[in-house]
Structures are given as structure tokens and as C-alpha cells.
């Protein structure tokens, strides 16, 4: 169950990073709504990470959480923020996913 909580926490990390990107792109009231989304997503992500680390090793949980956030944020950047796509970016995303899966596989 705590692995599911950790995955959800990682998805909320993607959400807060994406909201931060939208804050940069907007102004006025819209910017404040994105900033509120950032704060809510950040809070939920941290609370879920804390919950997951009650039974999972902190090093593994943090690395998996960060990996989910990093991969998700790169993909959000590519699909929604027009970040560049290159062979090397995709190659290193795949290696990061492999590392996260490997950490999960060797964790008790």
C-alpha cells in the first residue's frame, strides 16, 4: 500500500512542478490560481511522502519519489511546455525509469 502512496506522492510532485511552470507563464489572478495549485500539490506530495516513509526505507522512497517527479516533469515539459525532444533526453529518461524500477525491485 505504501508503494501506491509513494507513486501518488510522485504524481503530485509532477503537478507542483507543472503548476510552477504555469505560474511563470501567466499573470494576474490566473497566476495566483496556479500558485495555489502549486502550494496544494506540494503539501499533498510531502504529506504522502512522509506517510510512505513510515514503512519504506527513506533513501529508496526519496529516490523513487524524485524519479517519478523528474520523469513526469520532463514528459509534461515535452508535451505541454514545448520543451525540446532529443535522443539523449529520451535515453536518460529511460535510464532513470530503469533505475527507479531497480530500486523498487531490490527494496524489501
Image: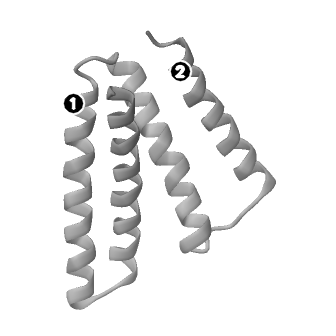
Q: Nearer the viewer, residue 2 or 11?
A: 2
Using the image, determine if residue 38 lies above or below residue 3. below
Which quarter of the picture shows residue 86?
bottom right
Whether residue 90 sits left or right of residue 35 in the image: it is right
Q: Residue shown at 33%/18% (left/top)?
A: 56
Which quarter of the picture shows residue 80?
bottom right
Using the image, determine if residue 60 lies above or below residue 19. above
Query: Which residue lies under the disc numbered 1?
Result: 51
Q: Residue shown at 56%/56% (left/top)?
A: 74
Which residue, as the protein is rendered here, is positioned at the far bottom?
28
Using the image, determine if residue 5 lies above or below residue 26. above
Using the image, determine if residue 48 lies above or below residue 80. above
Q: Quadrant of the N terminus?
A: top left
Which residue, as the protein is rendered here, is positioned at the far top?
108
Q: Residues within 10 Å of mark 2 (few under 14, many from 20)?
A: some
Q: Earlier in the sequence, mark 2 or mark 1?
A: 1
Which residue, as the protein is rendered here, is positioned at the far front?
1
Whether residue 62 sits left or right of residue 32 in the image: it is right
| Residue 13 horizontal/vertical position (percent) | 36, 50
Q: Residue shown at 22%/49% (left/top)?
A: 44
Mark-to-mark CA distance, 2 and 1 = 19 Å
Query: Which residue lies under the disc numbered 2?
Result: 103
Whether residue 88 sits left or right of residue 47 in the image: it is right
| Residue 61 horizontal/vertical position (percent) | 38, 26
SS category of the residue bearing label 2: helix
Amino acid at each position: 500500500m505504501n508503494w501506491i502512496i509513494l507513486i501518488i506522492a510522485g504524481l503530485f510532485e509532477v503537478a507542483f512542478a507543472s503548476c510552477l511552470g504555469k505560474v511563470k507563464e501567466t499573470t494576474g489572478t490566473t497566476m495566483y490560481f496556479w500558485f495555489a495549485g502549486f502550494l496544494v500539490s506540494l503539501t499533498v506530495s510531502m504529506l504522502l511522502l512522509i506517510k510512505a516513509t513510515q514503512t519504506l526505507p527513506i533513501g529508496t522512497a526519496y529516490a523513487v519519489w524524485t524519479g517519478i517527479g523528474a520523469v513526469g516533469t520532463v514528459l509534461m515539459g515535452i508535451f505541454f511546455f514545448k520543451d525540446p525532444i532529443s535522443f539523449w533526453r529520451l535515453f536518460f529518461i529511460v535510464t532513470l525509469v530503469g533505475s527507479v524500477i531497480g530500486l523498487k525491485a531490490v527494496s524489501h
